[in-house]
Amino acid sequence: MTLLRAMLSRRWILTTLLVVAGTLVCVRLGIWQLDRLEQRRAFNERYLEATLTSPLILESAPLADLTLMEYRTIFVTGRYDPINQVVLRNQFHDGEPGFLLLTPLVFADNTAILVARGWIPAAGNASPSDWRKYDQLEDVTLGGIIRLGQTEPGLGGVPDPEGQSRLDFWNLVNVERISRQVPYPLASAFIQPDPDPALTAPPYPSQPVIEVTEGPHMGYALQWFSFAALLFVGYPFFLRQMELGGSPVDSQQSAPVLQKDQK
């Protein structure tokens, strides 16, 4: 029996199909990791370009399409509008649950940009009236980075409910939807202010830590391609040993018979 006929025989056809399917899955996963690598490289390029670009000084919103400027440094001057501020749920600081306070900063021409002012504790902040203790009523000048919002939750995330005219507690920083409940034009992105180590009371601003690396994607891709090669090459070799060359297990050796000493 040839090797190909053995692979397609009734005895081995199911195993052959499983091996072929496993090989294709491993190859597809390797290609997926290569796609992730290209996405990571593209992100690194955009991030480095944004960080090396001169800071944007914004005096009105929207002056430009900020969605193309994520992670660029920005400076703004305006006045917070606490009446229309909202919070982002499920935020933690040093292991303590809380919210991210999002307050519109209104410019002199009555346009605005959303500012992620920082973390506030969940305890004592159950309603919008509780957030008023963080009001800053004078004009403020701040620096930070431009960030994009989210329109859809990630894997396992919870979307914000539809059909309500106003939401105070959000699962996503959906700038476009938040702009519908404020009485002035809102910029298409929001600001994460620079952290201030001198702060001793909330809100505590924060920014993401970005590592400009390619990550583990190339290693994972090689791993998946290796698994595919092992299946593709190893299975015929295994089958040849079993069908054509015989298996050591098949050869039964008789155990030596111990004869009793005759008296």
Image: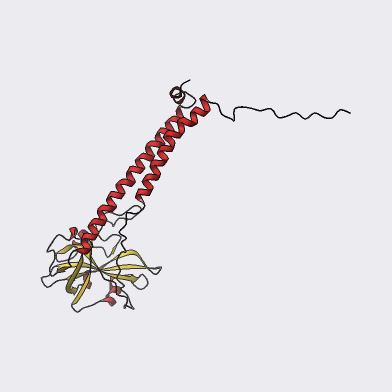
Identity of the residue drawn at 34% across and 46% down: 33
Residue 263: x, y in percent? 89, 28
Residue 253: x, y in percent? 66, 28
Q: Nearer the viewer, residue 91 or 94?
A: 94
Residue 59: x, y in percent? 13, 70
Q: Quadrant of residue 52?
A: bottom left
Q: Is residue 24 above or below residue 53?
A: above
Identity of the residue drawn at 49% across and 31% down: 238
Identity of the residue drawn at 28% across and 70% down: 128
Q: Outermost residue, left direction?
A: 109
Q: How is the image coloured?
A: secondary structure
> What is the total number of numbered labels drawn onto the structure image?
0
Q: Nearer the viewer, residue 132 or 95?
A: 95
Q: Is residue 184 above or below residue 134?
A: above
Residue 148 visible in the snapshot: no
Residue 48: x, y in percent? 24, 60
Q: Quadrant of residue 222?
A: top left
Q: Outermost residue, top direction?
A: 1
Q: Is residue 179 left or right of residue 234?
A: left
Residue 98 visible in the snapshot: yes
